[in-house]
Image: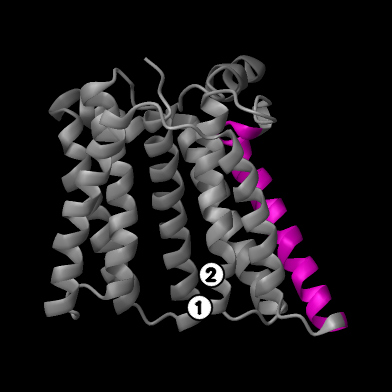
Amino acid sequence: MIEQFINENFMEPMCHYYTTPGTIVYGIMLMVTAWVTYKLLRKLKIKIDKRFFFALLPFIIYGGWTRALRDHMMGIYQSNFFCSPPIYFVIFFVTWAAILLGLLLEKKLKIPYERTVATVGLLMLAYNATLTQINNYDGFFIIIGLVSVWSIIFFTISHFKPKWLSSINAGILVSHLLDASSTFTALTYFGYYEQHVLPSFLIDIFGPWIMFPLKISVVWTVLYIIDQSKEDKFFKNLLKIIILVLGLSLGLRDFLTVAMLSY
């Protein structure tokens, strides 16, 4: 019975869709991973600042980009290690390997760790670029247009009402609206389906447009709660990076999956 439960909720859906038990378990695993990351960063005395963010950014982009390439079975990415959710563990360990290498070179050769980390990430992105070909320009420009409109709206709010929405929070929110715009476009015009449990449930009731108010209300509220909390700045910044990862990686995956679609 246990074996059947595991097969039905974890093994069979892998790389195709999510189940409710799977979503709960993966959510718990995300929280554990965040806690482990927090402890490691504290122990290694790594500050979560602009240096850390820009070193990490190529890996965030790489995760979403690689998922899109795996959807199209491109290059080395045909293995199930690169589908969801295994890819998130692959990226986690690769990123930490780059960070530890960077810290070692910083200690031995006085090379700032973020340069090593960013270089590794950029080399991985360069490989992905050799595999990527945009075929669906209709989908490409629809998504770019939607994200551009949302960017103008929220960065304007940030400019005039920074207490409502800081520029950092606006950027995180727009990353999630890239995900919403990509999902809306994929489902409305190109026959895709939503893999995740809650969005799929809401889309079945209201339609793909529900992704926009869902993302705006949830992400903006969570960011506001983080800003108002009494936790230390280190922990707040880590939470914001995790929220950015969830939006940007999924958004890039969906965007590039649609953009690389061949008719």
- Quadrant of the snapshot with the C terminus: top left
Question: Is residue 94 on the magenta stretch?
Answer: yes
Which kind of residue does numbered mark 2 sit on? Phe
Give the residue at mark 2.
Answer: 54
Disc 2 secondary structure class: helix
Position of 100 with respect to 198 (left or right) is right
Would residue 108 appear left or right of 245 to someone viewing this image? right
Residue at numbered disc 1: 50
Screen quadrant of the N terminus: top right
User: How many numbered markers are drawn?
Assistant: 2
Q: Is residue 34 magenta?
A: no
The answer, for residue 119, to whether it is visible in the render is yes
Q: Residue at x 19, y 73 (%)?
A: 158
Q: Residue at x 71, y 52 (%)?
A: 93
Figure check: 60 above or below 17: below
Amino acid carrying label 1: it is: Lys
Instruction: Pick the residue in front: 103 or 74.
Output: 74
Residue 240 coordinates in the image, percent (x, y): 42, 66
- Density class for disc 2 (Cα within 10 Å; few <14, some 14-19, many ≥20) is some
Asked whether disc 2 touches disc 1, contact meaning CB atoms under 8 Å apart, the reply is: yes
Q: Secondary structure at mark 1?
A: helix
Residue 147: percent from the left, percent from the top? 24, 49
Q: Residues within 10 Å of mark 1 (few under 14, many from 20)?
A: few
Residue 48: give x, y in percent of width and height.
54, 77
Residue found at x 46% / y 36%: 23
Residue depicted at x 57% and y 17%: 12
Range drawn in magenta: 82-108
